[in-house]
Amino acid sequence: NVGYMGESTEFLPSASFNTASDASKGLFGGTNTLTAAATISPFDNLNLRFLYTRSNIDNNVPLFDETGRLTGSGIGGATGEPIYGVADDGAGGSIDAATADTFGLNFDLKLSKRFGLFGRYYYGSTNIFPQADGLPDGEINAQAIQAGLAFPDLGREGSLLTLSYGIPFSILDGRDYLASGGGDGGVQSEVEATYYFPLNNNIALVPAVYWINNPNNFSDNPNIWVGNLRTQFRF
């Protein structure tokens, strides 16, 4: 499978975040992503999926110094994946639009009718191009990991309980380019329990509980507990 997406983040107020609707950006200007994915099933109970993504990330994030003065523009925020956070030139100054390469592998393995395993690993490298003379180009390299257990048809046919452990954004290199420093050396990790329970063919309840350790990669941040309940309608 191959797909192309021009970024259009509807919930953000400024047109600068919705580069897909800016005719001056062209087809490959602004923030856009080209993705290729392949699925291999060597056995009936095992699926392997490989993913590659090439991203162009617009420098549409304002940068401010400690006094609140605007100092330039960087990348990140809701349109900056694979970066979580805001990136500058390492000294608080502007950078040009960035490019990023992301490689992914995920799998699911069904060991029995009522038990399975799943996991994923992603590695992303974002190129940083400072606008100031004398500053070298650089990279931010990061990874994401998740592994879990799945229990199909637990309690009712069509239901699914999943338990997982994940690291959403672990910085391997280039921490100096992140405006917040990418944390204080801590690594955020999450434990999640989600239960999909169908009430009928059209409505399902999906309660979930999350425990987040070292939020935003700061070891001094307190742990966070999150609980939610979703109702899913299917037509």
Image (tube, rainbow, N blue to C red):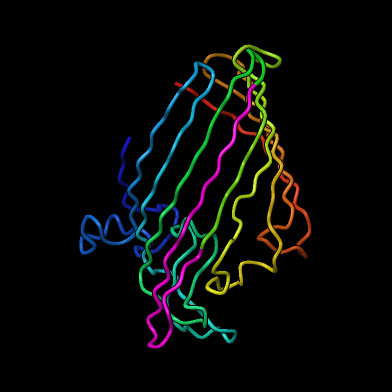
What residue is at 41 percent from the left and 55 percent from the top?
Answer: 101
Specify the principal SS of the magenta part. Answer: strand
What residue is at 61 percent from the left and 57 percent from the top?
Answer: 170
| Image coordinates for residue 57, horizontal then vertical, percent | 38, 62
What residue is at 69 percent from the left and 39 percent from the top?
Answer: 192
Q: Is residue 141 above or below residue 94?
A: above
| Image coordinates for residue 218, horizontal then vertical, percent | 71, 64
Q: How many marks?
A: 0
Classify the position of the N terminus by image quarter. top left
> To which quarter of the image does residue 198 belong?
top right
Q: Is residue 98 magenta?
A: no
Classify the position of the C terminus by image quarter. top left
> Left of 206 or right of it: where is 137?
left
| Image coordinates for residue 214, horizontal then vertical, percent | 73, 57
| Image coordinates for residue 190, horizontal then vertical, percent | 69, 46
Residue range corresponding to the magenta coloring: 116-140
Q: Is residue 138 magenta?
A: yes
What residue is at 50 percent from the left and 40 percent from the top?
Answer: 105
> To which quarter of the image does residue 166 belong?
top right
